[in-house]
Image (cartoon, rainbow, N blue to C red):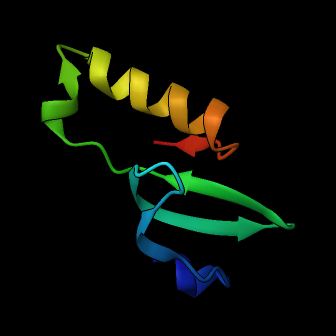
Amino acid sequence: ELSSIGLQPEEEALTKRGYRLDAVVEINGKNIGIEVDGPHHFLGRKPSGSTLLKHRQVTNLEQIPIVS
């Protein structure tokens, strides 16, 4: 649990452009997105195209790096 290490996650966070992230935490003044991707986000062992697109757009347009 993130709160056990001193982080205050905002769960099911909605970004300004309408993307929903599993959680967002602030570390050293910077927001970091956290995604817990289940099997439907993958094709074999590689992320699906929609998962890659979401991560890329949130990182580039929202300036929120994603950890998955």
State left or right for residue 54 relative to residue 2: left
Image point 21% across, 23% down: which residue?
42
Q: What is the quadrant of residue 9 in the picture?
A: bottom right
| Residue 24, above or below 55 | below
State left or right for residue 67 relative to residue 1: right
Q: What is the quadrant of residue 48 in the picture?
A: top left
Q: Position of residue 17 (x, y in %)?
A: 49, 48
Image point 77% across, 66% down: which residue?
27
Image point 71% across, 69% down: which residue?
26
| Residue 3, above or below 62 | below
Q: Position of residue 20 (x, y in %)?
A: 37, 55
Q: What is the quadrant of residue 58 in the picture?
A: top right
Q: Position of residue 15 (x, y in %)?
A: 50, 57
Image point 86% across, 66% down: which residue?
28
- Quadrant where the C terminus is found in the figure: top left
User: Which residue is at the front of the view, 62 or 36?
Assistant: 62
Q: Position of residue 2 (x, y in %)?
A: 53, 76
| Residue 55, above or below 36 | above
- Quadrant where the N terminus is found in the figure: bottom left
